[in-house]
């Protein structure tokens, strides 16, 4: 709970409750009315917060092993001449690297 003072010396108390369904909202309104009825010097403000954020419902793709990831930018270095190659692929990294290995070195080292 958080407290603040108002101009007319009425204390404002903020109460954060988890929002689960409409019943919790009704409970919050009932609680505000009870405080208003019995405590003239206090104003209760009930604030609702979701229990779960949307990020928990849709986990990111980052849990995959690196060789299975797709839509990545990658960097390769030639072991013969130290040439750099930076590429981007929408396919899995493993498949793209296999294509690089099967290609001729002339394509990589210019």
Image (cartoon, rainbow, N blue to C red):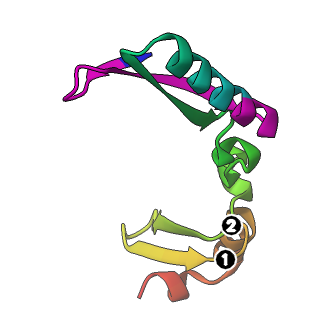
**Quadrant of the frame with the C terminus:** bottom left
Q: Is residue 17 magenta?
A: yes
Residue 85 in sight = yes
Residue 22 is left or right of residue 103, and the answer is: right
Q: Secondary structure at mark 1?
A: loop
Q: Which residues are magenta?
A: 3-26
Compared with 5, 104 (above or below) is: below
104 part of magenta stretch: no
Say which of 89 and 108 sits in front.
Answer: 89
Return the disc, 2 or 1, that comes first in the chain's sequence: 2
Looking at this view, name the residue that lies furthest to the top: 38
Give whichever of 37, 7 is nearer the camera: 37
User: Percent from the top left, x then y, of residue 104?
Assistant: 62, 84
Q: Residue at x 37, y 73 (%)?
A: 83
In which image quadrant can residue 101 be found? bottom right
x 48%, y 66%: residue: 76
In the picture of the structure, the residue carrying the numbered disc 2 is: 70
In the rendered view, does 55 fall on the left or right side of 11?
right
Which quarter of the rendering shows the N terminus? top left
- How many numbered marks does the figure carry? 2
C-alpha separation, residue under disc 2 versus residue under disc 1: 5 Å
Mark linked to residue 90: 1
Identity of the residue drawn at 72% across and 69% down: 98
Name the residue located 36 percent from the left edge and 67 percent from the top edge: 82
Asked whether the beta carbons under mark 2 and mark 1 sit within 8 Å of each other, the answer is: yes
SS for callout 2: loop
Q: Is residue 11 above or below residue 18?
A: above
């Amino acid at each position: 709970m958080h407290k603040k003072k108002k101009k007319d010396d009425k204390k404002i108390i903020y109460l954060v409750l988890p929002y689960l369904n409409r019943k919790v909202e009704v409970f919050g309104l009932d609680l505000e009315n009870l405080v208003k009825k019995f405590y003239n010097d206090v104003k209760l403000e009930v604030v609702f917060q979701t229990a779960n954020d949307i990020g928990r419902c849709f986990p990111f793709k980052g849990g995959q092993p690196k060789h299975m990831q797709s839509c990545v930018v990658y960097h390769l270095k030639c072991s013969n001449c130290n040439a750099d190659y930076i590429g981007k692929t929408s396919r899995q990294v493993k498949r793209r690297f296999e294509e690089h290995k099967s290609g001729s070195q002339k394509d990589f080292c210019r």
